[in-house]
Image (tube, rainbow, N blue to C red):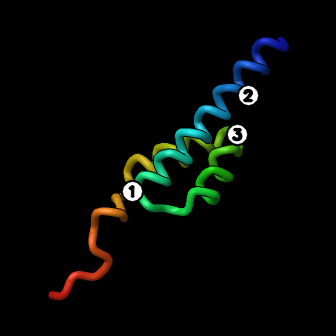
């Protein structure tokens, strides 16, 4: 049982690190997405959400029309 809890904890931390990396690479607030990534069972939703968010660092905020 202790090994299972350790395994789940390690996976949770790895997903939070991946959320941090994705947020940093795409230009979103890193602390916010890392904190949301640390919440168990919610971290996978945050991770998938970050996968589909557009990249803010390469897109122009407002293009003249």
Instruction: Say which residue label 2 marks.
Output: 9
Crowd band around label 3 with a 10 angstrom C-alpha radius: few (<14), some (14–19), many (20+)? some
Q: Secondary structure at mark 2?
A: helix
60 on left or right of 4: left
Q: Do labels 2 and 3 touch, CB within 8 Å?
A: no
Mark 2 Cα-neighbour bin, 10 Å: few <14, some 14–19, many ≥20: some
Q: Are marks 1 and 3 in contact (CB under 8 Å)?
A: no
Q: Give the residue displayed 79% in from the left and 21% down from the top.
A: 5
Work out whether mark 1 precedes mark 2 in sequence or the reverse, and give the earlier one: 2
Q: Residue 64 in the image: x percent, y percent?
A: 19, 87
- Pointer 1 local density, CA inside 10 Å: few below 14, some 14–19, many at least 20: few
Precedes in sequence: disc 2 or disc 3: 2
Q: Position of residue 4 (x, y in %)?
A: 75, 15
Q: Residue at x 71, y 19 (%)?
A: 7
Residue matched to label 1? 53
Q: Quadrant of residue 32?
A: bottom right
Query: Alpha carbon of mark 1 to alpha carbon of mark 2: how far?
Result: 26 Å
Q: Residue at x 59, y 39 (%)?
A: 17
Q: Which residue is mark 3?
A: 40
Q: Gap in Å between the C-alphas at discs 1 and 3?
A: 21 Å
Badge 1 marks a residue whose secondary structure is: loop
Say what secondary structure mark 3 lies in: loop
């Amino acid at each position: 049982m202790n090994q299972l809890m350790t395994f789940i904890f390690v996976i949770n931390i790895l997903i939070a690190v991946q959320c941090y990396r994705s947020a940093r690479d795409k230009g979103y607030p890193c602390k916010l997405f890392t904190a949301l990534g640390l919440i168990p069972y919610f971290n996978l939703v945050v991770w998938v959400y970050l996968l589909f968010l557009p990249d803010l660092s390469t897109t122009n905020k407002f293009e003249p029309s």
